[in-house]
Image: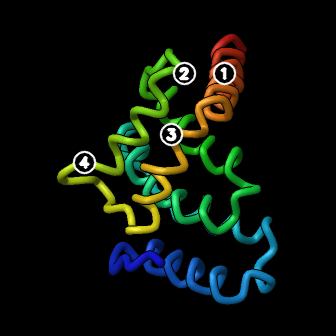
Amino acid sequence: MSTWISPPQLVALAALYAQAQAHPETLSDAVFLENVKNAHWPTNCWNYVEASFAIIAPACLLRPQLTAELIALPIAAMIAGGLEEAEQVIDIGLACATRREPYVEPSEEGKRWLTQVWPTLGEMAGAVFRARLQAALAEDGE
């Protein structure tokens, strides 16, 4: 699975992914999701998007039932970065898998998920994008 050697939260997440792969019954979806969310760190919106795709791709592979919740993390950062078109979401994720010098290097499994599965999730990604955009606009209106 993932072979990150730094930063510490990604090293810990790689161990969690290995545990989830070897013994999926030992981690509830709630604990798994919490650990994935906690592996993110503050940075600018677009670096966050890159890091988030590298972080969530193996998680989506291991727990496909959590995909909608997991993809909401980079999508929310895209919206915070000014993205207004849901149609661009898939292309941005694909670019994260093929970037020469990524902010966070996706694992081989993550790259496979981003290049093979992610492009098939346009409808889900669009729905998540629209929901997150509506929530962001509602927040701004308050």
Alpha-carbon neighbours of circle 1 within 10 Å: few (<14), some, or many (≥20)? some
CB contact under 8 Å: marks 3 and 2 = no
Name the kind of residue labelled 2 in the image.
Ala
Residue drawn at the location 40% of the way across and 53% of the way down: 51
Distance from the alpha carbon under mark 1 to that under mark 2: 7 Å
Q: Is residue 20 above or below residue 38?
A: below
Residue that lies at the very extreme toward the left in this rendered image: 100
Q: Secondary structure at mark 2?
A: helix
Mark 1 near mark 3, Cβ–Cβ under 8 Å?
A: no
Q: Earlier in the sequence, mark 2 or mark 4?
A: 2
The residue nearer to you, when weighing 57 against 52, is 57
**Which secondary structure lies at badge 4?**
loop
Is the residue marked by circle 4 packed among few (<14), some (14-19), or many (20+) residues within 10 Å?
Answer: few
- The disc placed on residue 142 is none
Residue at 60 percent of width and 63 percent of height? 61
Q: Which residue does the numbered mark 2 point to in the structure image? A: 86
Name the kind of residue labelled 3 in the image.
Pro
Disc 3 packing (10 Å; few <14; some 14–19; many ≥20):
some
Query: Which residue is disc 4 drawn over?
Result: 99
Question: Could you say which disc has been placed on residue 130 in the image?
Answer: 1
Query: Sequence order check: which comes first, mark 1 or mark 3?
Result: 3
In the rendered image, the quadrant that contains the C terminus is top right
Q: Residues within 10 Å of mark 2 (few under 14, many from 20)?
A: some
Question: To which quarter of the image does residue 92 belong?
Answer: top left
Query: From the viewer's perspective, is the residue at label 1 or at label 3 nearer?
Result: 3
Helix, strand or loop status at disc 1: helix
Answer with mark 3 or mark 2, whichever residue precedes in sequence: 2
